[in-house]
Image (cartoon, rainbow, N blue to C red):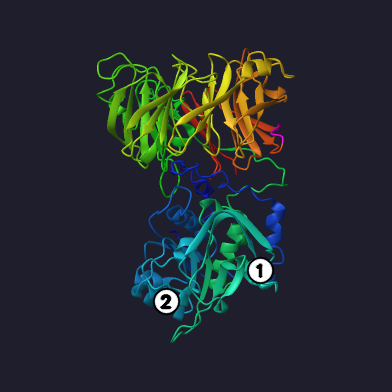
Amino acid sequence: MNAQPNRRFFWVLFLAVGMMGLSMAAEPAPDCTNLRHKPRTRAEVERILENKDPSPVSKKPLNILLVAGPNDHGYAAHEYKVWQRTWGEMLSSAPGVTVDTAMNWPSPKQIAAADVIAIYQHGTWNPDRAQAIDAHLAKGGGLVYYHYAVECGSGDPASFAQRIGLAKQTKWRIGQVGISFDQQGDGSGKNHPIGRNFDSLHLNDETYWGLTGDQSKIKIIASEGANPQVWTYEPVVANAKEQGRVFVTVLGHNWASFNDPLFRILLLRGIAWVAKEPVDRFNELATAGLTLLDSETSPVAPRFVQGFHAKDNVRGLRNIINRANVLHDDCLMVGSGWNLISAIRRDSQSGIFSCTDEIQPLIAFQKINPKIKGEWIALHMASGAKNVLYVNGTKGTDNDASPGMAWYRIDPITGKNTLLGAQKCDSGCLVTSANKKGLYLITQNPPAIQVYRIQDDGTPTRADTIAGKGLGSLGAAKLPSQSGDTPFVFSPDGLFLYNFSDADKSIGWCKVSGDGSLAYVGSCDVEKTLRLSDVKIWNANAPVSMRISPDGKHLYTLTTSGGMGLFQRDIATGAITYVPNVIKEVFELFPTDFVITADGKTAYFIARGIGDKNEQSLWWWSRDPGSGLLTLQGKAALLEGTKPYYLLLNDVLGTLYVIGQDTVRIFSTR
């Protein structure tokens, strides 16, 4: 990389606007709602940075070598390549710093030239690595190990621990993590230069314990209970010219942690410390490219990042597939009304979309495939187990005019497809259960939900039909998406499916079993409830979007009248009860979709004008997690011609996608 100071402010890389497919199979559905870290306040960051060394910060030349490996985890975790690219760019922008990179393991020449070697990969330990590490430490070099790098594979953990202090994870836990810098009660962690001003740090990440090694030989910076999570180590190496230093953090599972300014301060101090430099050398990088709040209640205004227009042969871009499955690892998949399915692909390392200003068809599916013919009115798609894409059309399998279903194996990186099978079926909207064992076809005639079991090879097998008030499709022209015109939404735990039926203007809900089967539970007459409420929403017969808050306690509906229905939700039974609320700001608009952030504190709306109003806008609201009520915080005009229909949120990376009729516009919420 360029050795000169780089001030291009490449921070768009930190958006890493790749997609996240929620395709992990589990019963109930995995909790992915807290992967995104709330932005820190300016005061929080300034408190940790204060009392820095008053002497001038050194700018002596440093060569930092970043070692990554192939991805070994689901998207947004263990992002070794993204870390190497983005942190390489960031560190090389600091005065006096050059950055080199290596995949899997560096060459002897790279190791000899490095002052600091930082390693983030699935760890492996063998005699060759031991020899290389010993030589690096013997010259006084610095070592930094992140998260899974402490694993030693089939190597000897005791030998590895002799070099880095503790090694090889045996027990682990993913979730909310709180580490203390004063676990021993002697202030040792927070009195260390790396832990200065820290009392504790809370992240959504992964901890390890039961590691091999002698804790008395390391300097514990932070612990979770009795388990060290951040430490330094100064190993004794034979024939050393100068003693080397090691910094290790077990945390670093989620990519969002690397974009938390407090965690970043910890890592930057660790790099400086092992380089025997003042720990404040990289302070200016702590918040580079990140949003800081002025206060705990400050809203984050979305910031425009990138936009695309569809070419003429990719019409009907708003025919988007299920929002939980459109976010594959490396491509955003969209469907058109003319038998085309396209993908916007991202660079797997930089996170930048490979197309610059136009969306082109990825493969066109050859008018879906040879077995499904005719001009389809709508593509109804849902992603199933093992990256299988299910497509339902309103016309034709073979030469028959009846509707059909086809399913494809999708490469999550390129988006390319392989036809697995096709069969006749009714026309409707498709959705898969959270555990990917059930495929549901929501039909209009008759209004019902047809249940299919997904076999191990992805083949759908008809199992049951569930009928009841509130069930059934919004119609053949409506789309099978949890964003915009949506007739259904799952509860966050995946245990309840809610469906709005245009036939009886009601929401019905079903219990989802572990094998994917459905059991009808009950319904709520939405039109009557809202029309007789204090808001008096008369045109409540067509919710354009339904959402459930991440904590599962509230269900929201947007209606064609511009009003909102807010319902309290019983998590155990799934029952919903109307909560009086008034949102006057959007009554003169046509809100088309909205999303709620994973922390449940912010909601984003998109809306189009009605009548003489030509407004096309993006709105953001603060949400009270207790009552569920929303308060307007701000809005921004969208480019004329956007015609916003759907809103997608990659909450892990803070990226908002506004899907228009023929456009995609991307915003950062950080």
Q: Name the residue under label 2.
A: 159
Q: In which quarter of the image is the C terminus?
A: top right
Instruction: Classify mark 2: residues with Cα within 10 Å, few (<14), some (14-19) or many (20+).
Output: some
Q: Going 55% across and 75% down the picture, which residue do you hit?
A: 215
Is residue 155 visible from the viewing direction of this image?
Answer: yes
**Magenta-colored span:** 627-631
Q: Which of 353 and 48 is in front in this view?
A: 48
Q: Mark 1 points at which residue?
A: 183
Q: In which quarter of the image is the N terminus?
A: bottom left
SS assignment at label 2:
helix
Q: Mark 1 or mark 2: which comes first in sequence?
A: 2
Q: Going 51% across and 81% down the picture, which residue do you hit?
A: 243
Residue 201 spot, x, y in % from top left: 64, 59
Q: Which of 9 and 428 is in front in this view?
A: 428
Height in image: 347 above or below 176?
A: above
Magenta region includes residue 629: yes
Residue 621 spot, x, y in % from top left: 67, 34
